[in-house]
Image: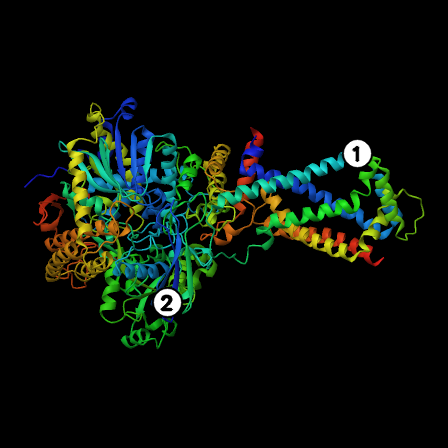
Amino acid sequence: MGKEKELNITLKVWRQRGPQEKGAFETYQLEGISTESSFLEMLDVLNEKLVKERKEPVVFDHDCREGICGMCSLYINGHPHGKDQEVTTCQLHMRRFNDGDTITIEPWRSAAFPVIRDLMVDRSAFDKIMQAGGYTSVNTGGIPDANAIPIPKPVADEAMDAASCIGCGACVAACKNGSAMLFVSAKVSQLALLPQGKVEAAKRVKAMIAKMDELGFGNCTNTRACEAECPKAVSISNIARLNREFICAKLKD
Amino acid sequence: MATIDSKIPKGPLAQKWTNYKNHQKLVNPANKRKLDIIVVGTGLAGASAAASLGALGFNVLNFCIQDSPRRAHSIAAQGGINAAKNYQNDGDSVYRLFYDTIKGGDYRAREANVYRLAEVSNSIIDQCVAQGVPFAREYGGLLDNRSFGGAQVSRTFYAKGQTGQQLLLGAYSALSRQVNKGTVKLYTRYEMLDVVIIEGRARGIIARNLVTGKIERFFGHAVVIGTGGYGNTYFLSTNAMGSNGSAAMQIYRKGAYFANPCYAQIHPTCIPVHGDIQSKLTLMSESLRNDGRIWVPKKLEDAKAIQEGRKTANDIPDEDRDFYLERRYPAFGNLVPRDVASRAAKERCDKGFGVNNTGLAVFLDFKYAIQRLGKDVVAQKYGNLFQMYEKITDENPYEVPMKIFPAIHYTMGGIWVDYELMTSIPGLFAIGEANFSDHGANRLGASALMQGLADGYFVLPYTIQNYLADQIQVPRMSTDLPEFVEAEKGVQDKINKLMSIQGSESVDSIHKRLGHIMWEYVGMGRTKEGLETAMKKLKELKKEFWSNVYIPGEANTLNTELEKALRLSDFLEIGYLMAIDGYNRNESCGGHFREEYQTEEGEALRQDDQYSYVACWKYTGENSDPELLKEPLDYEETERKTRNYKN
Amino acid sequence: MWLTSSSVGRKLIMSISGLFLILFLAFHMSMNLVAIISSDAYNQVCGFLGSNWYAVAGTAVLAAGVFVHFAYAIILTLQNRKARGEQRYAVSENQGSVEWASQNMFLLGAIVIIGLCIHLVHFWSKMMLPELLGNAEMIQATEAAVNSVNLQLNNEVEATQNGAALILYTFKNPVNVVLYVIWLIALWFHLTHGMWSAMQTLGANNKTWMPRWKCISNIFATVVCAGFIAVVFYGYFA
């Protein structure tokens, strides 16, 4: 492992009791944080310290801590999941920071993602969009053999790239318009590319866009901030495909 | 002693499941609507079960502790999912998958269950492809396979290094569809805190809304637990931070048997521990062992030089490298089952050949694969895993070998279930990793996904009907019944007690101490004395927890420390169960390695005449040891042998 | 109507109206270049696009295009601000790959609109408008402006169709030159993002075409703006 060092850092952390309450930054000092530890482990140290001081710990979402569940969020020094590209907050390591740094940590900020407490936000809007049509309408069982429909490898690979979205919401957090287009387009693309999903592609894209609009996400203005901050590097070419699918579907109505 | 009826259907092994389905009772569509089923957990098992039951027309209530069903830890599975498709024409069959699984499990699994698992494995792949899971494909457009530990065929289907994610998203999308249809109601950020038993049957749960802190009651004609394993008992494991064994412990305390708790899988390829504020361990997929070669230096002085930083892996010439898995197990080489690979790594490190600064790591080297296949092919196959490794360790695996070490990964033990996946409490089912049923003493790679989805898609939706067919006359019950009130009160009392301790130790600090005890005494190598020490220390730690834990904040609102404390209170008891079970099992098998029982070559030595049974532990009270019940394991089809991966 | 009620539909309106304006710009720029080559030829074009019915209809459609583009820019910006939520980030920075123009399209658009207004006062109000209104005072004002520059022409043209003279008259004034250059630089930024963005919104984009569209947008924006600026400087130095 690399050269381990210890850092002293200042944290400015957003604290907010509830969705309706006013929040504010609080400043904390941490000493002797190992460069080998992860960002969330650094926050664990902060929380352990707060609990020792008999204060309430900072609330933040996290689960798998290996960059795949999409639970961790955090807007770190002006970037969702921190400045490093193609990482989630839980994969961010303290070796990316310097001794004496001040780190500002904010929750995702978007009208569709209200703050629950401190750095934890409510992303259930994503589930609602998925429920509107992010599936193929097949019941369990009675399915033809998996190899019955050959799918060209490039198509399968492209679908896989779109499907790698972890639903973390960094795209919405990064977008100045609070748009969820990258998230929606990843699912629409994955299913529109595959023959299994093509069957109801038109219905799906209309339903998912309608739900996305209803939930208060913004309009995409192609700034590409979503793509730049996406921890899984989901491409905005998916958004182009979504637009194509949507416009064609509507023109056929 | 109570008799344990595993309800295995009659008939030859290959016919049992068909016979069962032909004769089981079903619920007609009109009646399905009248029946409520609670499914706790939204992982592969929970989500697939909830979606399938919803699609059948049942009224499903589905709970998860995360903000979305898609976060469940099944998502982190990397390598793949097994199925006996034999697409590669390499001699695979349902029987061979069954046999490999039984053998991999060191002859401690139930034959009938495993055969059924192998039988439905093919339907899982079909189902997932229909859902739009983008499995890897060949240029001809057909599905690709790779090989995994413990098998001599390539039967593992995969989606890059994110197979679990893709399968879970498939199940999640099926679940989302049912939510949209109104057959499934989702309760996210809810944590089950108790099961409600009415007249001997499971009739509902008590759950805490994690955002508001409110304790709520839910009725169901049946309750299904799909809450995963209890690997986090060790604090450091590859499990997610929120993974816990609390639902299992709640139903255990209400009378469900806990089976084989000591069978915990130690995964050989994890990134080694770096320091004492580490919160979790990261797995590197077993698929890496397809092309990576595991080695340590042959010479002790080289190992020492590496440990002290005077030499690096690339300074050691090939002839001074000890590819110990290839040396010890020529037939399977680097692809021996996980328990074997883990113990072999421990053996080398114990002898001083470990290769990082702590001496607790071995090399996993891709130099040879890059020479053979080229960097591009290696990158295509493992690129995202390499990237993940580099993110964590800051070392480039294309240039220097990975360092890996075993870590707790999966628990084969779990809630005892019969052939129908029903626990010893009528109406209460356990699926996926939460139950004990299919993996015996060791699970093969790419079989957890298979089992979770088999249970949820293709087994439970049948077997639960056999139970519910008798329940169609039972009306929805009021949650004001005294049993609900009492269960809620029990939960509330426990929370009040925890909040009132106001001691001086944080939840995590006690959990870390639990982890140390478990890893030290109930880890890779266990002894009689060690397990005795563990039980003693665990009792003390439990006492300390209940007298000195500190939880800030209030109970009637969001309180993450309280959530952790509730889970830790159960981990402490699971730890004890694991220790007592390991103490009782005087043999080595699979993930349970008792140092007293090994062959001259250091392999696990089973005691089939005495321990060929499922150890079912029955709760007897807060302060007394549980009672051991035994379900004998009869092998009709397979001959029990000492596992041999040498030739 | 899905065009106005859905986010993608609203963006489609932006993209189509934008592409229409892009076409107009290309046409207008090519027409302007004629002024550098020959004042007479340019004035012939101006005469052709005088107060004929087709020119008036074209102007109306053009105005509608500008109006729709601008109105939807306002609607989308307001909706997007609302979607962003009330609480703003304390610290926010862009990844290097995010272009400045893409984040500031409304600001750039506003500059372009202001520039357009100035431009209309300078030219349209002196050429087409007086003819349409038949207002003698306005026509006289135009004549005064045209006569103040010394322009050699082979043919007699009416003052309101002497665009060549108006160019010289307007850009004699260095303040106007600076204003136009600022305007055109804003337009350049607006176009570099707007053009590929329109294709993206139409769905006519993918990983292969993304760099191509960006390249085409950059070339187009540069050619159009350089063409316009060339005429401005021609007016100033001539």
Quarter of the image for the N terminus of chain A: give it: bottom left
Q: Chain of mark 1?
A: C
Question: What amino acid type should be assigned to the residue bearing mark 1?
Answer: Tyr
Q: Secondary structure at mark 2?
A: loop
Residue identified by numbered label 2: A35
Check chain identity for marks 2 and 1: say if they share one. no
- CA neighbours of label 2 inside 10 A, class few (<14), some (14 to 19), many (20+): many
Question: What amino acid type should be assigned to the residue bearing mark 2?
Answer: Thr
Compared with B574, B225 (above or below) is above
Q: Which mark is residue B167?
A: none
Quarter of the image for the C terminus of chain A: give it: top right
Residue identified by numbered label 1: C54
Q: Is residue B586 visible?
A: no
A27 vs C106, left or right, is: left
Residue C156 position, x and y percent, is 93, 44
Cα gap from disc 2 to disc 1, whole angstroms: 71 Å
Between C45 and B199, the one lying in front of the other is C45
Between A169 and C73, the one lying in front of the other is C73
Residue B615 position, x and y percent, is 13, 47
